[in-house]
Amino acid sequence: MDWTLEVVVVPVSDIARSIEFYRDKLGFVQDFETDAGGMHFTQLTPPGSGCSIVFGNGPGMDAMQPGTLKGPQLVVADINAAREELLDRGVEVGDVTVFDERDGGTFFGFDDPDGNSWAVQQIKARAEKPLIPRS
């Protein structure tokens, strides 16, 4: 049986500001936005990912305080290109750190406007062998 992780709730304080950050600065694709029945939430997906993020005031989205999500990882094939892309989009990012010279041991981090902390990990093998095949 497959068990796929498909959605991660990100606790935020301002839905519009967070859409602007994740869609316009990080380049996530906004899959949908729902504003009905007293609920307002949206789902966005990083390019090439099978897992999305969701935030807003929908069911179960208020269990964590804004800014308390720490450590989800985005994986890229070229960490320097990814870092430069985010810098060009106005995202404040940390320095690249090599914890291990082997593939997968290089990281940098950034925070969203609420202080949720993300890590970006380089796995060079993703360039040739992505987890989700490209069509």
Image (cartoon, grey):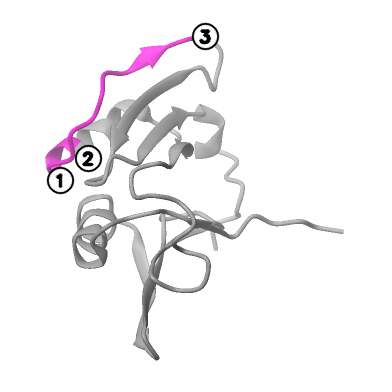
* Main secondary-structure element of the magenta-colored stretch: loop
> Answer yes or no: do the residues labelled 1 and 3 have beta carbons within 8 Å?
no
Name the amino acid type tagged 3.
Answer: Asp
Queried whether the magenta region covers residue 111, the answer comes back as no
Which residue is denoted by mark 1 in the rendering? 89
Q: Is 16 rendered above or below residue 73? A: below
> Answer yes or no: do the residues labelled 2 and 1 have beta carbons within 8 Å?
yes
> Given the current orientation, which residue lies at the most extreme bottom position?
37
Name the amino acid type tagged 1.
Answer: Arg
On the image, the x and y values in percent for residue 77 come to 45, 34
The residue drawn where x is 26% and y is 23% is 94
Secondary structure under the numbered disc 3 in the rendered image: loop
Q: Is 109 rendered above or below residue 58? A: above
Find the distance from the CA under tag 1 to the CA under tag 3.
28 Å
Secondary structure under the numbered disc 2 in the rendered image: helix
Q: Name the quarter where the C terminus is drawn.
A: bottom right
- Horizontally, residue 4 falls left or right of residue 46, namely right
On the image, the x and y values in percent for residue 102 come to 56, 12
Which residue is denoted by mark 2 in the rendering? 86
Which residue is denoted by mark 3 in the rendering? 100
Name the amino acid type tagged 2.
Answer: Leu
Crowd tier of the residue under label 2, counting other residues whose Cα lies within 10 Å: few below 14, some 14–19, many 20 or above:
some
Q: Is 6 rendered above or below residue 101? A: below
Mark 1 / mark 3, whichever is N-terminal: 1
Secondary structure under the numbered disc 1 in the rendered image: loop
Determine which of the numbered discs, if any, sits on residue 50 in the image: none
What are the residue bounds of the magenta stretch? 87-101
> Answer yes or no: do the residues labelled 2 and 3 have beta carbons within 8 Å?
no
The residue drawn where x is 44% and y is 19% is 106
